[in-house]
Amino acid sequence: MKAETIAPLFANNRAWAASMTARDPEFFLRLSRQQAPQYLWIGCADSRVPANEIVGLLPGEIFVHRNVANIVFHADLNCLSVLQYAVEVLRVRHIIVCGHYGCGGVAHAMGHGELGLIDNWLRCIKDLYLQHANELDRLDEASRLRRLCELNVRQQVANTCHTTIVQKAWANGQELTVHGLIYDIRDGLLHDLEVSTNDPRQVPSIYRLQR
Ligand code: CO
């Protein structure tokens, strides 16, 4: 199969690389030697939520993991590997778990439909709904989705903090803060959910690594 159908992407790419080089002739050469990002972004795969653009960072400045509904699942080797590499090798200072309002994954988990394999991935959001059903059931549908998007970020921040990777980093005295943000696709603005965690004492005892 010919690659003609994605020809515009190559044209965009050449123009982008040329503009980056025009601005900073050493840019790609410098990046090719090493990456030293300060941030790990764990966000939704949604095409409207591109990590670098939203926070105005260049290639090399943010390490990115995205999946449907920005889930940090304790047995997901993909997410855990990204987390471990970012924390232990790159030694990022901040982990940003970023959800977004209007998340299709969260909306699907709130309903009763079937999409296929992904229903299994999103099951943990149904579990989360059940935990907060008293609060959520009282809201109208739009507010319920917004609230569950926020609750999902809070849960994924907690899940990140409960991993052996973050626990070990803290036990070793490494400076590491896990933040929970939510992005509004209607106005392009990020909001801090104020659940930043940088100390094992903020985490329930059962998850704490003690040495
Ligand atoms: Co989403």
Image: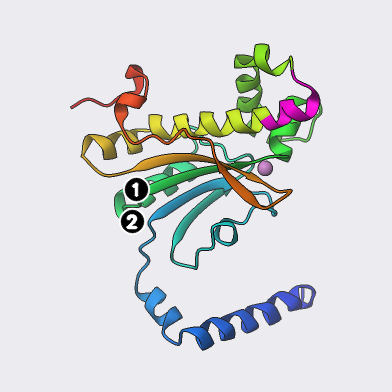
Q: Quadrant of the image for the C terminus?
A: top left
Q: Is residue 33 placed above or below 158 in the rendered structure?
A: below
In this figure, which residue is indicated by the disc labeled 2?
90
Residue 75 position within the rendered picture, expressed as x and y whole percent measured from the top left: 47, 33
Kindly state the secondary structure of the residue where label 2 is placed: loop
The residue drawn where x is 37% and y is 41% is: 177
Confirm or deny contact between disc 2 and disc 1 (CB under 8 A): yes
Ligand 1 within 8 angstroms of badge 2 C-beta: no
- Name the side, left or right, on which 165 lies relative to 190: left
Kindly state the secondary structure of the residue where label 1 is placed: helix
Residue 112 position within the rendered picture, expressed as x and y whole percent measured from the top left: 80, 24
Q: Quadrant of residue 116?
A: top right
Residue 48 position within the rendered picture, expressed as x and y whole percent measured from the top left: 70, 53
Asked whether residue 44 appears in the rendered view, the answer is: no
Q: Residue 172, which numbered label?
A: none
- Magenta range is 139-146
Residue 108 position within the rendered picture, expressed as x and y whole percent measured from the top left: 75, 32
In this figure, which residue is indicated by the disc labeled 1?
87
- Name the side, left or right, on which 58 lies relative to 175: right
Q: Given the image, on which type of amino acid does mark 1 rest?
A: Val
SS assignment for the magenta stretch, majority: helix
The residue drawn where x is 35% and y is 26% is: 202
Q: Given the image, on which type of amino acid does mark 2 rest?
A: Leu
Q: Quadrant of the image for the N terminus?
A: bottom right
